[in-house]
Image: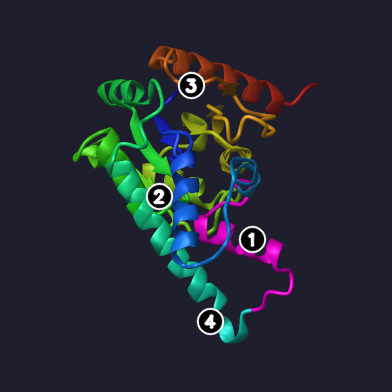
Amino acid sequence: MLQALIFDVDGTLADTESAHRAAFNHAFAEMGYGWVWDEPTYRQLLMVSGGKERILHYWRQTQPTLTDIGGAGVRDTVARMHELKTAAYERAVLDGAVALRPGVLRLIEDASREGLRLAIATTTSPVNIAALLRAGIGPDWQHYFMVVEDASTAPLKKPHPQVYLQTVRRLQVAASDCLAFEDSANGLNAAQAAGLATVITPNRFTEHHDFTGALRVVPDLRDTRIATLREWHAQATEERARTTTPQF
């Protein structure tokens, strides 16, 4: 029986990646670095989860001999870049540069009315989540979500399943009674590793990812209703039962 819906944030609830990319570039310029992440570069960097991790990965790509003597220096610089990036992203959201994807708000409202438990499972920062959902849902956005797990509570980034395992545990439901919503291969792999059937809504930054094993891949949620989700979930449950029942 479907009891809970668990949502990723960036790229899933909203098309945030263009705003994130612009915010990264703003931070690089403000700190005097000549880095510019164009869209093809950023599409590849999205295979690395986490903003700080993404910066460090790129820095090591462009400077293979990079070292961090004494554990400071490089990581302090990355942390400062990420602070500037986060501030630039929050300003962009408040200025209306990011909106919820089609069908997202209606689905959240419908699920809440029908008594489904709602949760967020993301490895983005609490500041980014709050900025986006205040703008997209309103100041009371937290009332919709029984559980919010983020970078502050789940430090192991996707595709590690930590954030989903913690979310399911706090929801106090079985993973088999949940559906996850993701937009990326890393997110799908994390959800699957936690035992969650997953609906994928790719965007132009992730449409080239491998979504093998997803319950459904749909362009967005505008035509998705709770009844549809219940039907998909029932099909997934039946398929799981067939593949785990011993054959004699």
Q: CA distance from mark 4 to mark 2?
A: 28 Å
Mark 4 in CB contact with mark 1 (< 8 angstroms): no
Q: Tell me residue 167's x, y (percent).
A: 43, 46
Q: Is residue 139 above or below residue 31?
A: above
Where disc 3 sits, the SS reads loop
Type of residue at label 3? Asp
Which class describes the residues within 10 Å of circle 1: few (<14), some (14-19), or many (20+)? Answer: some
**In front: label 4 or label 2:** 4
Mark closest to the chain's N terminus, 1 or 2: 1
**Which residue, as the protein is rendered here, is positioned at the far left?**
139
Q: Nearer the viewer, residue 158 or 63?
A: 63
> Which mark sits nearer the N-terminus, 3 or 1?
1
Residue 63 visible? The answer is yes
Q: Earlier in the sequence, mark 3 or mark 4?
A: 4
Mark 1 lies on residue: 57
SS for tag 1? helix
Figure check: 106 above or below 161: above
Q: What mark, if any, has residue 197 been given in the picture?
A: none
Q: Quadrant of the N terminus?
A: top left
Quick check: marks 4 and 2 in contact, CB under 8 Å? no
Q: Amino acid at mark 1?
A: His
Front residue (pair 37, 70): 37
Q: Which amino acid does the dot numbered 4 rest on?
A: Ala
Question: Disc 4 marks which residue?
Answer: 72
Q: Amino acid at mark 2?
A: Glu
Residue topped by disc 3: 220
Quick one: which residue is furthest to the right in this view? 248
Q: Which mark is residue 149?
A: 2
